[in-house]
Amino acid sequence: MDVQLFTDSWWPLVLGGLTGTIPLALVSFAIGLVLALGVAMLRLAAHPVLSGVGRAYVSAIRGTPLLVQLFVIFYGLPSLGLTIDPWPSAVIAFSLNVGGYAAEVIRAAILSVPTGQWEAGYVVGMSRTRTLRRIVLPQATRVSVPPLSNTFISLVKDTSLASLILVTELFREAQEIAAFTSEFMLLYVEAGIIYWIFCTVLSFGQTRLERKLEQYV
Amino acid sequence: MSEAPLLTATGLHLSFGDNHVLRGIDLEVRRGEVVALIGPSGSGKTTLLRSLNGLAAPDAGTVAFDGGPSVTFDGGPRRAWGRAGRRAQAARDALRDRSAMVFQHHHLFPHLTVLQNVTEGPVQTRCVPRAEAESRALGLLERVGLADKRDAYPRELSGGQQQRVGIVRALALQPDLLLFDEPTSALDPELVGEVLTVMKELAEEGWTMVVVTHELQFARAVADEVLFLDDGAVVERGAPSTMFSAPREERTRRFLHQVLHPLD
């Protein structure tokens, strides 16, 4: 094994992760969560058309590969006259994807809050929206942290797909060094190790967040 | 002399599918009066109580507070969408402006402290300044002996303490009418007394209360009127002293006997 190459390429790869992978994942996750809350509310709506729209969205996202979604946006849309740069394309694709998966998590978390909590909110005079915001969502948040952390960790790894639409991030960095040196095994294993370190750190963060939210119940 | 009743409910009907839960119930509650609803489980007591504050949506009948709101149920949609559905829902919501409810399972907000549980309603929905809401809440907590628990979370309290906070949360809304849905049924027997004592004091202070209960001694000691419900209808109503000592109806007699002498 070429130890020299391993250490020489370590910082370029980590840097690719810190400037490419992590920002891409964070921005997409933030936008995706907002989207997911909206989709979850659609799914829970009493009106059949609204809940149907929510269901269709979740079905489309979950029923198609992320890579296909990514390619439709980056390589497909230009033929309709809409060309989007690599980075925004990736953010759009990942956000839409998170929106579909996290919507189901949030919906389930909201449903896990007992009906009595809604009724107690109404009885102290709150509207549905206010009860959702002040009573139900804080309780649902606690329930949804573990599954949402899962979604986020998956997303961090899935951002490697963005290398296929020319986004500079950890995996693309590895590909370029590998192509240049022909040390494929070394570079791809090294990339894997760095992804693993990122995800392990995130798991620690998840545990701490869960503990913080466990002060009640 | 005859003042208008605080609450008048007439002809309440409600079905869940084939299950006719309320079959034309009339109820009047005067200011300062305590009305107890008793009856076997499934008799419609809780549904009747929930109809009075719009948590349940009857198919027919009227619930009217003196000075408003007044809601006539016309069998319209129970769903919350479409113009008719939204209007019906808004009408039911308005019923809760005059009343507050204490639940069987307290339903305190687990993510809020005792004090926050009590002030949440007044601050968020009655536009009371926080400082004023807190000092009022502390006064009420003091009264039920829980001022020292102000910063505790509900899970840190005993069942009886939780239910007393539930009562304080309702009182803090300064409602004209207090609704109690079997407030002691979920408690361990030794904790029932502390909750009933608070309720008795409230009755003596002149609060208007409708209480669904299995505590017949409480009903006898505190209620001005008792309604015995069975199968969605009022079988018998009257002063507790007469009903408990000399029930007119055979079904009332059987129910009282079963509750008071379960081993016979």
Image (cartoon, coloured by chain):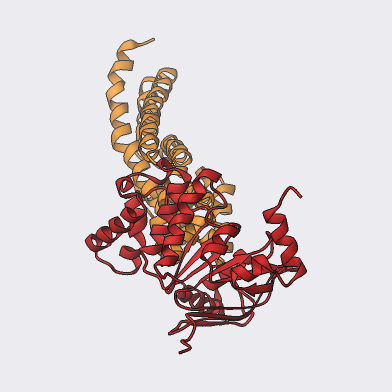
Chain colours: A orange, B red
Q: Position of residue A47 (x, y in %)?
A: 57, 68
Task: Tell me the quarter of the picture where residue B234 sits.
Answer: bottom right
- The image quarter containing residue B243 is bottom right
Quadrant into which the N terminus of chain B falls: bottom left
Q: Is residue A42 left or right of residue A214?
A: right
Residue in view at x 45 percent, y 65 percent: A123
In this rendered view, identify the residue nearer to me: B47 or B3: B3
Q: Nearer the viewer, residue A25 or B55?
A: B55
The answer to whether residue A126 is seen in the rendering is no
Q: Residue at x 33, y 11 (%)?
A: A3
Measured as percent of width and height from the top left, residue B154 is found at 41, 46
Q: Is residue A201 above or below residue A39?
A: above
Q: Is residue A56 left or right of residue A89?
A: right
Q: Is residue B234 above or below residue A18?
A: below
Q: How many marks?
A: 0
At 58% from the left and 57% from the top, the residue drawn is: B215
Work out whether residue B7 or residue A132 is closer to the camera in this orientation and state it. B7
Q: Is residue A134 left or right of residue A79?
A: left
Nearer to us in this view, B91 or B106:
B106
